[in-house]
Image (cartoon, rainbow, N blue to C red):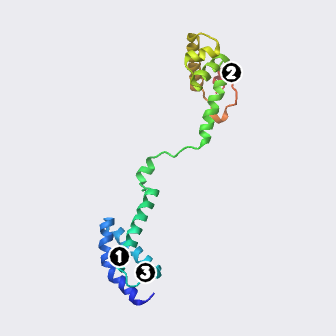
C-alpha cells in the first residue's frame, strides 16, 4: 500500500460521511461506518484495481458494512432494560416434570372407571358416544364418570398442601395427607 492510495482515501472521507449519514440517519453510527469502511479499505487495499472508481469502491464497502450491521442487529435484537426487567424468565423443564408427577399421583387416586373415562375422553379425545362404546356403558354414564372424575381430580390437586418435591409417587389416602400437613 502506498501513500498516494491513503491520500486518495482521505480525500473521499467527506463523500463517505454524507453517504453514511443518509444511510444511518445518525451521526454517531455514520462516523462508525466511515471508520469501519476506511479500515476495511486499507486492510484489503490489494483488492482495489488501480484506475477504477475509488469512491464507488469505498461506497460499496460502506453500504455492505451498513447492511451487515443491520442484519446483525436484527438477529440479536435490541436490548431494553425496562422490558427485560418486566419479562419472566422461563422455568426449566423440572417444574413441568414436578407438576406432571403431581397430576399423575393424584390421577392414581381416582377409581379405575374414572381413570378410564378421563383417558378416553380427556387424553385421547374420543367423543362421549365413542368412549361409552369402548367402555361398554351408556353415554350418560360416561358423561357422569368424566364429570365426577374431573371434579375429584381438581379437588385432589387443590387440596394438596405439601410441595410437589416432597410427595410420594402414589398417594392412596388423601385425607391422611391433609391431616398430616
Q: CB of mark 1 within 8 Å of CB of mark 3? A: no
Q: Secondary structure at mark 2?
A: loop
Residue 138 at what x, y percent from top left? 59, 9
Placement of 92 over or under 74, stated as above or below: above
Label 2 crowd (10 A; few <14 / some 14-19 / many >=20): few
Which callout, 2 or 3, points at the residue further toward the start of the chain? Answer: 3
Observer-side mark, 1 or 2, equals 1
Does the rendering let one see residue 32?
A: no
Query: Mark number for residue 48?
Result: 3
- Count how many numbered circles sit on residues in the image: 3
What residue is shown with label 1? Answer: 56
What residue is shown with label 2? Answer: 173
Q: Marks 1/2: CA distance?
A: 82 Å
Front residue of this view, candidates 106 and 26: 26
Q: Marks 1/3: CA distance?
A: 11 Å
Front residue of this view, candidates 154 and 62: 62
Residue 62 at what x, y percent from top left? 38, 71
Front residue of this view, candidates 103 and 167: 103
Label 1 crowd (10 A; few <14 / some 14-19 / many >=20): few
Quadrant hosting residue 78: bottom left
Amino acid at each position: 500500500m502506498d501513500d498516494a492510495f491513503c491520500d486518495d482515501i482521505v480525500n473521499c472521507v467527506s463523500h463517505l460521511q454524507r453517504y453514511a449519514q443518509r444511510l444511518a440517519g445518525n451521526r454517531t453510527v455514520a462516523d462508525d461506518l466511515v471508520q469501519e469502511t476506511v479500515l476495511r479499505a486499507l486492510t484489503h487495499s490489494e483488492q482495489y484495481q488501480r484506475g477504477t472508481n475509488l469512491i464507488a469502491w469505498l461506497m460499496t464497502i460502506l453500504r455492505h458494512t451498513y447492511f451487515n450491521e443491520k442484519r446483525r442487529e436484527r438477529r440479536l435484537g435490541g436490548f431494553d432494560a425496562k422490558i427485560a426487567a418486566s419479562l419472566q424468565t422461563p422455568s426449566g423443564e423440572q417444574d413441568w416434570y414436578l407438576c406432571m408427577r403431581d397430576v399423575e399421583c393424584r390421577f392414581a387416586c381416582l377409581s379405575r372407571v374414572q381413570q378410564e373415562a378421563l383417558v378416553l375422553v380427556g387424553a385421547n379425545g374420543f367423543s362421549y358416544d365413542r368412549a361409552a362404546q369402548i367402555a361398554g356403558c351408556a353415554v350418560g354414564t360416561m358423561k357422569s364418570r368424566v364429570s365426577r372424575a374431573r371434579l375429584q381430580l381438581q379437588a385432589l390437586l387443590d387440596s394438596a398442601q405439601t410441595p410437589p418435591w416432597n410427595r410420594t409417587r402414589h398417594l392412596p389416602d388423601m385425607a391422611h395427607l391433609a391431616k398430616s400437613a
